[in-house]
Amino acid sequence: MSNTAKRPHWRFEDLEIWQLARDMAARFHLVAERLDQRRFYRHAEQLRAAGLSLSNNIAEGSGSTHNKEFIQYLNIARRSLFEDASMLLVFESLGLLDTGEADELLADCDTLSRKLTNFSRTLRP
């Protein structure tokens, strides 16, 4: 039996918003690696941190016993997504990210932002 068969399954893994956030964090990490290669270390670290904040806050909020608290974590994740979007726009204006890649990432950020908002609404009484 493999190790993955033994590990627990977490509630957040079933959430589409967490899956999308995980994928976005991985994509931001790839952009950050390119920034590191160009010696923009601080920029890269900030992009990684905000990217990981997306999936981490969704996961942390899903562990809450109260929907109100989960909504707060979703709001933090959404704010981190806005931070990521802002960085992408700045990186594009500095020539550190090409327009095509920026457009694709920003469109995916917008989609995830809308999904976070809609999911939050389902948790309200």
Image: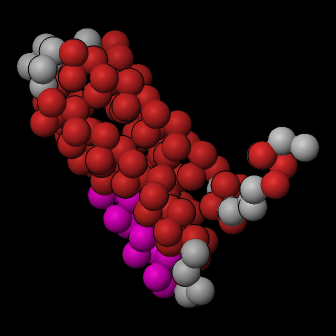
Q: Quadrant of the C terminus?
A: bottom right
48 within the magenta span: no
Q: Please identify the dominant SS of the magenta region.
A: helix
What's the residue at 30%, 58% (across, down)? Answer: 79
What's the residue at 25%, 12% (across, down)? Answer: 98
Q: Is residue 45 above or below residue 40?
A: below
- State left or right for residue 117 relative to residue 33: right
Across and down, in percent, residue 19 comes to 60, 46
What's the residue at 12%, 20% (across, down)? Answer: 39
What's the residue at 52%, 43% (across, down)? Answer: 22
Query: Would residue 114 be visible to someone looking at this image?
Result: no
Magenta region, residue range: 68-79
How many discs appear? 0
Q: Quadrant of the N terminus?
A: top right
- State left or right for residue 111 relative to residue 125: left
- State left or right for residue 23 relative to residue 88: right
Which of the two residues, 98 or 59, is positioned nearer the viewer here?
Answer: 59
Q: Which quadrant holds residue 30?
A: top left
Query: Would residue 38 be visible to someone looking at this image?
Result: yes
Q: Residue furthest left?
A: 94
Across and down, in percent, residue 24 comes to 46, 37
- State left or right for residue 74 relative to residue 99: right
Q: Is residue 75 above or below residue 38?
A: below
Across and down, in percent, residue 5 comes to 84, 49
Q: Which quadrant holds residue 97?
A: top left
Q: Is residue 18 above or below residue 93?
A: below
